[in-house]
Amino acid sequence: MVIVFVIDNYGILTNGTTITAYRFVEALKARGHTVRVVSVGVNGPDMYALPERYIPIVSEIARGQSVLFAQPVDRVLREAFTGADVVHLFMPWKLARRARRIAREMGIPCTAAFHVQPENITYGAGLGPAGSPVAHFIYRYFRWILYRHIDHIHCPSQFIARELRLHGYTAHLHVISNGIHDFFHPASYQEDKEGGTHPSGSEKKTEDAERAAGEETYPTPEKGTGADPENQERGTPQTKPFTIMMVGRYAPEKRQDVLIRAIGRCRYWDRIRLILAGAGPREAHLRRLAKRYGIPVTFGFYKQEELRNLLWQADLYVHAADVEIEAIACLEAIACGKVPVISDSKKSATRQFALDERSLFRHGSSRDLAQKIEYWIEHPEERHAMEKRYYQRSRIFRLEYSVKKAERMFEEAMLDERIRRTETQSEGRAYKKRILKGLPTRLFSLVFYYLVAIPLLWLYCRFVLRVHFHNRKVIRKLLLRREGAVTIANHVHTLDSAMVGLATFPRKPIFTSLPANFTLPVAGFLVNILGSVPIPSTVTENGIFFYELSRRLRRGRYVHFYPEGELVQFDENLRPFKRGAFQLAVDAQVPIIPIGISFKKGKSGFLGFFFRRQIHVRIGDPLYPDVHLQRRDALEDLGHRAWQAMEILVGPRS
């Protein structure tokens, strides 16, 4: 593929987004792709330079955060896009918006990444948690100016994907980690891609932490001189210091201040040595705070090798940030075999990396963080055991794994572009019309469904068929989340589609049906008017079917499948599942809701009329696709879990 990355500041490697872009460019090139970069001040092969855009006041503040803005030049963008297969946008600024318009004119599909968390902006403006309404507005603003035009969005974490859904983003959200480079691994790891051996953490000298030019450390204070008035009785000094490390910009939302205060409260304050790796506008404030608490802190920005060496010698990694889209720095620490202690902030994705409560602390609470630090100091055996588990956990976030998922995203964007072109041709246009239907048909279907079909079917199912519904609270919970879902059920009754409709009420599911059913004299009219869509019969129809239904799922609709395929009346055994339902759920990143239909035999003889057969419709808990797996593995995993859930739902009951 020929892939074009459009990013404002590619050359500044102190910025997390830029580092991610740089690593992806190198990894994609290594896999045989041609990657072009459009950015400020770049030069060399496949590099397309743009001038810097100056925004009064804003640019001055942004430079302090290692952020530049690019001025779009149409000639440069068109030259970079010529012959490209896909264009990938990194930031929602003016450059990306102009690049999207030009790519659309040239017929090139666009994808985009969501790297700018609005909460970072509000915290940077000094609003803190009180800036939530402003952050909500920024989410909506970003969607309006750029992301509503993008069908495929790269989300660095499942957390930010959920946030985008909550704020009305309906694109296909691809959860792809920014990726840990293979360079980061435990010190005891003997054979890596560099070859040779690596020293263990104990062999690294602590002087490595003080290599940054001009950095400052504070001497370890004497016992009882800590600034925290509540902690005058301290632990006893030790020969080897206990090293705690945190990596991140010196910015308000990163909350290094909480970590400094926590160490000030800790019983073992005089054993602890703190390394705060990073750079940013809050450095002077953090230095003053550390001096006030009498905490020895090393400040500095480190090259990659120096950073890895520091992580190797660290005993514990703390990530105190209130706001994070992913926190690749925390992942790198975990990849180096370090146990993390992470803020449980609801606006931070980093908490997903914690394996248990011992690695989480109450966000903003220095007291709770101090207790967690004390626990890990007092339990070195537990810490060493957990280091191995955390290293194993980090493997699914490796850069190579992320690049494969990014390739899949680009391929899907290209496929969707081909499908959109197919929909403008005669065969595709006719099938799309059968799926979407006209406005009069949709309006009549809504009125008929809610005012006629549902009341009559409820009366018939409840009093004639004696249908009982269980666990409808699942549907009520999903209604609050406003997310779509794929429902599946065993196909065992002529009216089981009516039962599914009643089970998912007030949602109106989109039912799939065989094309032949639409031609039946009376049933065909009902099937069509109730909004069913025909199952595809050609390759062209198949692409349109999954593309259009996936879009509706992402907009909150339900789509129903019978994964067994054919109807077998009163069958008590599950039959093999087809893959269509699970493929659609994985593509749209929506849950599967399993619905099991089972029968309870009635009495015979005179009492049979009063105690005739009952039908039980049981709704299972939603099953979400595993976003960390490759598409094929995620599909198989979801299908397997759905089968297990359905076996329980339709199994024998006492």
Image: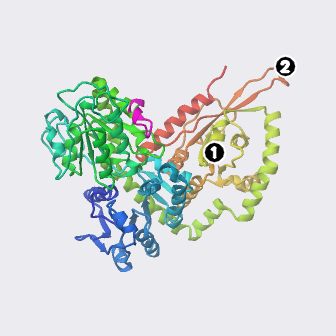
Ranked by sequence position, the earlier of labels 1 and 2 is: 1
Give residue 631's position: percent from left, percent from top. 43, 47
Side of 210 relative to 481 (left or right): left
**Residue 359, magenta (yes or no):** yes
Nearest the viewer among 556 and 513 is 556
> Residue 61: x and y, percent?
37, 64
The residue sitting at 42% across, 30% down in the picture is 357
The stretch drawn in magenta includes residue 85 = no
In the picture of the structure, the residue carrying the numbered disc 2 is 605
Magenta stretch: give its range.
Answer: 357-367
Q: Between 421 and 109, which is closer to the camera in this rendering? A: 109
- Three-letter code for the amino acid on which mark 1 is drawn: Leu
Q: On the image, numbered disc 1 is attached to which residue?
A: 480
Is 421 rendered above or below residue 572?
A: below
Instruction: Identify which residue, 186 or 14, lies in the foreground.
Output: 14
Quadrant occupied by the C terminus: top right
Q: Amino acid at mark 2?
A: Gly
Q: Judge left or right: residue 150 versus residue 434.
A: left
